[in-house]
Amino acid sequence: MIQTIRGFRDILPEDTALWQAIEKTASKLFEDFGFKEIRIPVIEKTELFARSIGEATDIVEKEMYTFDDRKGDKLTLRPEATASVVRAYIQHSMGASDAVQKLYTIGPMFRRERPQKGRYRQFYQINSEVFGIESPYIDAQLILILNELFKRLGLSELEAHINSLGCKECRPTFQKELLNFLNGKKEHLCENCLRRMDKNPLRTLDCKVPECRAAMADAPSTLNHLCEKCKDHFETVKSVLNEQHVDFIVDKTLVRGLDYYSRTTFEILTTALGAQSAVAGGGRYDALIKELGGPETYGIGFAIGFDRLAEIVAQMLNDAKMRAHNASDAKEFQDKNLYAAEFLKLVSIKTPDIFIIPLGEKATRLAYMWTSALNIAGIRTETDYSGRSLKSLMKRADKLNADFVLIAGDKEIEDNALVLRNMRTKEQYFITAENPVEQLETFLNRV
Ligand code: AMP
């Protein structure tokens, strides 16, 4: 039997309801904040990612799915969305109509990482990118949006970490000081850090190897080297977040794994899946658009890890269901998670409104016709073409958890009296066989 490749997986129907609910909640929130959806290809020229993400990054060095197409062009399955959105922004001169563009996109990304819980080789991200705004208000707003989205999804145990990496004015001085520091610590640094010291010294700050961490404990921080403009920018981000009651922690080790970031970077961390891991991350990339051949334009964005988010929300829902057995806990859950109730409605499993049980050939044809008409009218209706007995079809209706069953045997059709049974109250009604669709529509709107 042929199976999925390592690190790839199917998202099955039992989970897609939750994925769709998250997607709906996110796009509604983005649209309310003035973002518009953009859809971009999953394959791009390799050069796009090599130039934007940076040659000396994990992604470009070892994680990209890159191949030659039949004409020998080097192509890559996108490992992230920002580079492609920037390419689209430049290619379509999107800034010409309005300098400010607020975009979001949802889709799969591909990185050849070591698969483990919460980490896949095809994973999904919810991305948002804003072009044309230098103001720190937008930095704060993106973090506010993440905060609001996670609140609507009922999430807790989150920590927003923020940092500022400075700009092309102040970063060189900092890098020089960092290099001096690193040179004095060479014997304690891992191979990766040593190799990257010259190309990408900032990455040594977030190395996860314990010896490196210890060696870097008193490393210089970008925050002590910000120029006046970057300092003011970061101060405003923080004060606005404080005023809007968005909690955050200033984390000087937060440099993020991609080269293009400047000024504000941020990550939302959670312990919900065991060890602390990031569920979203982002930051400013003011130099990237020019770097990729576009006009000098400010840029900032974030990526939410959809797979991890879905796992956390699923866990949260399970907890809620368990707690719902205890009425006071359930109330507490709802009080605390103002939006969870709204979201719960979105995730609730859709069961049939009506299950039509046809008995006989003529009835089966009619049942098909009525079912189609009811489906078109927006009433979730199922039927069965197998010709099985009333008893076994009642069982199927029960399993599908249908609200109503319509029993339509050839005889009932002839007698012009179909039986409509409320599966919850067991009440029965008769409806005529001439225009059952209209009758059911009126009936269902009434009950
Ligand atoms: P990044 O683009 O690396 O900043 O990632 C943004 C978010 O995407 C992370 O915080 C993760 O939640 C998620 N993510 C990144 N890589 C993977 C992966 N291989 N599998 C699942 N989620 C991922």
Image (cartoon, rainbow, N blue to C red):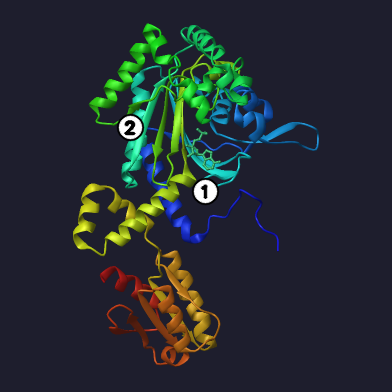
Is residue 51 or residue 160 the one in the foreground? Answer: 160
Q: Tell me the kind of residue under disc 1.
A: Lys
Image quarter in which the C terminus is found: bottom left
Q: Residue 111: image x %, image y %?
A: 61, 38
Q: Which residue is mark 1?
A: 117
Image quarter in which the N terminus is found: bottom right
Is residue 166 or residue 378 the one in the foreground? Answer: 166
Q: Residue 61: image x %, image y %?
A: 66, 29
Is residue 382 or residue 184 the one in the foreground? Answer: 184
Q: Residue furthest left?
A: 328
At x 49%, y 85%, the residue is 363
Question: Which of marks 1 and 2 precedes in the sequence?
Answer: 1
At x 46%, y 79%, the residue is 396
Q: Residue 312: image x %, image y %?
A: 41, 48
Picture layout, residue 366 above or below residue 207:
below
Q: Residue 362: image x %, image y %?
A: 52, 86
Provide the secondary structure element on which disc 1 rests: loop
Q: Which residue is mark 2?
A: 144
Q: Tell me the kind of residue under disc 2.
A: Leu
Picture layout, residue 209 above or below residue 173:
below
Answer whether residue 358 is visible to the viewer in this image: yes
